[in-house]
Image (tube, coloured by chain):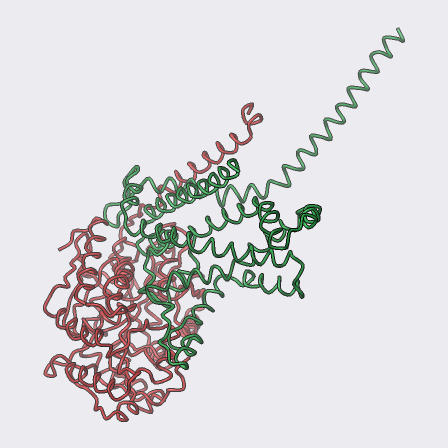
Amino acid sequence: MHLFKKRPAVGLAATAMAAALALVACSGGASTNTTTAAPSTITQAAIDTAMKTKTNLTFWTWVPTIKDEVALFQAKYPAIHVDLVNVGQGAAHYQKLRTVIKAGTGGPDVVQVEFQYLPSFTQGGDLLNMAPYGAAGISGDYASWIWSQVSSGSAVYGIPQDVGPMGNLYRKDLMSAAGIKLPTTWDEFGQAARTYRAANPGKYLTNMPGNDAGQFMGLLWQAGVRPFGYDGKKTVTIKMDTPEVAKVIDFWNPLVRDNIIGVVPDFTDPWYQGLASGLYASWQGAAWGPSFLQGTAAKTSGLWSVAPLPQWDTQKPASGNWGGSTDAVLKSTKNPIAASQLALWINTQHEPALMFATKAFLFPASNTILKDPAFVDQKSAFYGGQQVNKDFAAISATVTPDFAWLPFMDYAYSSFNETLGKAFADRTDLATGLKAWQAALTTYATQQGFTVK
Amino acid sequence: MSQTAVARHRPRAAEMQTRRRGGLKRRQAIASYCLVAPFFLVFLTMLVLPLFYSGYLSLFREQLVGGTVFAGVGNYVRALQDHVFLGGVLRMARFLVIQVPIMLSLALVFALALDSGRLRMQRIIRLSIFVPYAVPGVIAALMWGYLYGPNFGPFAQGARAIGLPTPPFLGNEWMLGSIMNIVTWSFVGYNMIILYAALRSIPTELYEAARVDGAGEFRVAWSIKIPAIRPALLLTTIFSVIGTFQLFNEPNLLRILAPNVIGVGYTPNLYAYNLAFINQDINYAAAIAFLLGIVIMIVSYAVQFGVLRRERRS
């Protein structure tokens, strides 16, 4: 006390140090996961009791119209109150989620997680296994390529909500004006791109951005590439020096180098303006594409059509998937039964699941909805009245199974922008960019303690 | 008897007076501590504690597989060998050497012009030069991002109309210059106001003496005004140096428009942020942040001592 009186600065510093060390000591235990024995199956009686108990759930999601589906859930289970929070879209959402997981408090009960990010959360044991809570029985309603992404053995970590089978969205008017018929193979597509560019200097048949690894992954998926693997524990596979990858790279290399296709980053204002003004005549995008074109590019509504992606082998039509989300439950939730029932109910009950598909324009993951006439026969004004759901349902059936992700896709996508994506944007050799990307991923994986196969 | 009683009373009265004075002083002291306490509370919890926690974090290494281990100075050694971090620091040094002299010279010229009294509509000119500083940094970056746009930005459209190629503002070579432009535009007014205030406080007798000696306006500016505001110039220089190395806002926002030009480590501050939130490498990010702080301290001291030495010599 005597010292602090005479030299208050010293006293202040000492107090600060003590407080900091105390804070740090308290937080040191936050990283350990409390392991409680997982129940083998929850009885229906236990579920019924829980659904009649007054509960407050927090649900983090960015799907804009989800309050309608949640309202249906709350009408069915009036004792459960759901707090819907939108903490951002994409990267911002995951940053906040990882922060609350690390802090141990403040997290939601149910959370939207896209397919490619599920392994990064299961790796840390952050998600609740919903198999005992009723999720084990729904596997029959999903294609194997979807179910393999949300499950690991008998455990289920996410309820599939929507998927993004990739197709060729194209402007029929622009292509016929240039005298090009719809390409069905990638060779035809390459030639069509050159013809289109020659006929319309200043315009492009399509745009391949340098900032969207998701789109490029989808195209690799279609070509039969399986670049990533994760065994759920400590081993990852990073394999991109295969002939299938080289086939895809060698296709895009000359188009990028010779300025035959655009390389503007997607979902930016210049890109939207490009689509609105007819700068790009096609987009190898996913089924959820139109929802992004209702804004700036709204005046092109009615001029678009959908076809399957150009094929590598017309005998074996294939497609890839770009995006799509699931609803998962955090292990730290205090209401595992209610939370898992919320995730299950809005995605598997007929009425809310159909609402997602017909009103929110999310492409359904569930086979039941895919076959529902209300969905299949829907005519789309954006596509000039084409019954695109039928076409995308057919495409969805050709998505090849067994595509896996790394448990650190945040880093993978960001390093794509620095390496292969940069090669696209600068119009330099894509093969060099690909090698750099593989090297960066391998370095990061070893740094983080994984064994790389 | 009465004398001693009186004698006993007087010191007691004097004692009571000093006690009353001491009481007032103590009450004033307590009051001032109470008034400053909220600031110190926030300062401690929002600045000092996180600083210590950050320093503590930087001594560890956490892996996705394998948990947390004590790494000592391992993170700092890794940072000093990290070519992304060093590249970012060098980039900021280049930025500093080009942008700060240009911006401060402009601010000085504007301040001198305003102080000369020769301009009409002084208030309007002063306000319009200052307005960009009032524009929030995010809005400024978004606005300039549109202006720089290669397809629909006005410069691009103007160039195409004349038949010139589109200026690649967001391209690899010009990106740093484009960011320099945004920062200069934003902060010239702020620095100008500081220098102008310093100019206003120069005693006017010096000007009269100079005019008697036959000095013109430029000579007065060069020989009297600029030397007189040297402390203010030093202040703005130090602020600019610190601000340059902390550059984050503009590259972060332009990264959305040009994600392949602005990498994760374009500036050290951006690198620390991306390390924490994309790589989930919080410990390494803390080490980078501390190293950046040390770099800023070194450069600031170097600038200060350089100026002091020149002053001592002259």
Residue B253: image location, x then y, percent: 41, 63
Q: Is residue A170 above or below residue A211?
A: below
Is A341 left, or right, of A5 in this rendering? left
Q: How many numbered circles are shown?
A: 0
- Provide the letter of the chain coloured green: B
Judge whether B280 appears above or below A291 on screen: above
Q: In the figure, is residue A267 to the left or right of B203?
A: left
Chain A colour is red
Q: Is residue B98 visible?
A: yes
Q: What quarter of the picture does the C terminus of chain A occupy?
A: bottom left
Residue A46 x/y as whole percent? 34, 60
Residue B26 or residue B126, whichever sits in front: B126
Q: What is the residue that sits farthest to the top in this orientation?
A: B1
Residue A311 sits in which quadrant? bottom left
Q: Is residue A132 visible?
A: no
Q: Tell me which residue sits at (19%, 55%) in the image.
A: A442
Percent x, y of residue B143 = 47, 69
Residue A377 location, x and y as percent?
A: 30, 89
Report the residue that reaches farthest toward the front: B214
Residue A434 is left or right of residue B244, and the answer is: left
The quadrant of the rendering that contains the N terminus of chain A is top right
